[in-house]
């Protein structure tokens, strides 16, 4: 049985959603954040020394990093689904977005979150952060022009990997700022597998 070690208010939804799409049995072990620091509890370090989430445990294998976990799941359990054929243009676009989600798109969102906690002290950084948000999410919005998915004509793990950043951006910017991203979020959140993940494990 696959275990997903999940920190509340974290990025684990992508993993449980993918498992539901794959129809693979799993169990979720959930952890609360510290009420003051908002950090993970020390118990997570018993699973992985970084004490971060999500963590996947599949028999003796322990994996961190959402992108690596998603790639493992589709390789082991996808039977050719949720990833384009290797060597194709779509495959390399898929790889690009798998890395882009955390390597680039999440940075301005995290900066907005953390700098926002500085109050007036963070004000000088706001124009640069906002320009980066417009740049990155404008790019993703344009990437969905005339299409439903970021790669090909069906859902791939790249869509799942990008979903967290896109959901955060739509919530932060409002539903009209990036209409294609809003449409993508609505489509994702209407998928039966996504809804099952929410029903089983909460938001």
Image (spheres, rainbow, N blue to C red):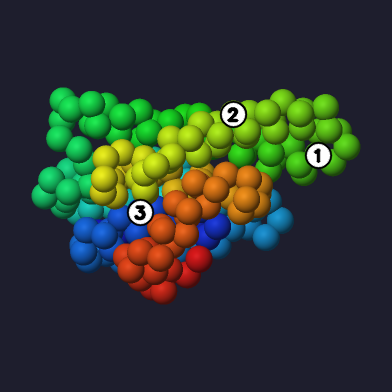
**Which label sits on residue 15?**
3
Q: Secondary structure at mark 3?
A: helix
Q: Residue 62: image x %, image y %?
A: 29, 46
Q: Nearer the viewer, mark 3 or mark 2?
A: 2
Residue 178 position by quadrant: top right
Residue at 50%, 47% in the rendered image: 181
Relative to residue 131, is residue 161 depicted above or below? Answer: below
Q: Quadrant of the N terminus?
A: bottom left
Q: Residue 88: image x %, image y %?
A: 18, 27
CA separation in Å, label 3 and label 2: 27 Å
User: Left or right: 179 with respect to 118?
Assistant: left
Q: Are marks 3 and 1 in contact (CB under 8 Å)?
A: no
CA separation in Å, label 3 and label 1: 32 Å
Q: Are marks 3 and 2 in contact (CB under 8 Å)?
A: no
Q: Is residue 14 visible?
A: yes
Relative to residue 112, is residue 1 depicted above or below? Answer: below
**Which label sits on residue 118?**
1
Residue at 36%, 44% in the rendered image: 147
Q: Secondary structure at mark 1?
A: loop
Residue 66 position by quadrant: top left
Q: Which residue is mark 2?
A: 135
Please identify the residue farthest to the right as the structure is shown: 120
Q: Badge 3, how many Cα within 10 Å: few under 14, some, many 20+?
A: many
Residue at 81%, 33% in the rendered image: 122
Q: Secondary structure at mark 2?
A: helix
Q: Residue 49: image x %, image y %?
A: 43, 42
Give whichever of 114, 55 is nearer the camera: 114
For marks 3 and 1, the one nearer the N-term is 3
Relative to residue 191, is residue 53 depicted above or below? Answer: above
Q: Are marks 2 and 1 in contact (CB under 8 Å)?
A: no
Q: Nearer the viewer, mark 2 or mark 1?
A: 2
């Amino acid at each position: 049985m696959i275990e997903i070690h999940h920190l509340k208010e974290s990025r684990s939804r992508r993993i449980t959603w993918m498992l539901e799409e794959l129809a693979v049995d799993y169990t979720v072990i959930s952890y609360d954040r510290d009420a003051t620091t908002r950090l993970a509890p020390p118990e997570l370090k018993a699973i992985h020394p970084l004490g971060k989430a999500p963590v996947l445990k599949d028999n003796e294998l322990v994996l961190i990093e959402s992108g690596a976990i998603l790639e493992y799941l589709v390789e082991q359990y996808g039977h050719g689904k949720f990833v384009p054929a290797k060597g194709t243009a779509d495959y390399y676009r898929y790889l690009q977005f798998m890395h882009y989600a955390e390597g680039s798109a999440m940075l301005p969102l995290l900066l907005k979150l953390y700098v926002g906690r500085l109050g007036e002290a963070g004000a000088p950084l706001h124009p640069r952060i906002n320009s980066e948000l417009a740049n990155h999410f404008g790019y993703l919005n344009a990437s969905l022009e005339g299409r439903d998915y970021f790669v090909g004509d069906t859902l791939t793990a790249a869509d799942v990997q990008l979903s967290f950043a896109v959901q955060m951006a739509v919530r932060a910017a409002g539903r009209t700022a990036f209409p294609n991203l809003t449409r993508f979020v609505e489509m994702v959140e209407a998928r039966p597998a996504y809804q099952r993940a929410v029903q089983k494990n909460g938001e």
